[in-house]
Amino acid sequence: MIAKIFHWWLGVGLSIVGIVATLGIIGGYVKKVVAPQYPGKRQRRED
């Protein structure tokens, strides 16, 4: 019985870690790749 409970909580923890890692990778991609392509008003240069 303890093994079933332990495995369930282990699965929950790994799922949360996986979701957080995926969101971090997506956020890093947006920050490094997509954001420089579409600069905001503060980042635009007047040439």
Image (tube, rainbow, N blue to C red):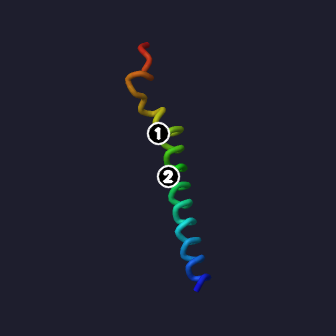
Mark 1 falls on what kind of element?
helix
Q: Compared with residue 29, is residue 17 higher up or lower down, i.e. above or below?
A: below
**Quick one: 31 or 47, which is closer to the camera?**
31
How many numbered discs sit on the rendered protein? 2
Q: Nearer the viewer, residue 6 or 18?
A: 6
Q: Residues within 10 Å of mark 2 (few under 14, many from 20)?
A: few
Measured in 3D between alpha carbons, the distance from the residue under mark 2 to the one under mark 1, in whole angstroms, is 15 Å
Q: Residue at x 52, y 68 (%)?
A: 12
Name the residue tied to disc 1: 34
Tell me the quarter of the picture where residue 6 sits: bottom right
> Which amino acid, by three-letter code, is at mark 1?
Val
Quarter of the view holding residue 45: top left
Residue drawn where x is 61% and y is 82% of the image = 3
Q: Position of residue 1 (x, y in %)?
A: 58, 86
Q: Quadrant of the C terminus?
A: top left
Residue 34 rendering spot, x and y as whole percentages: 46, 39
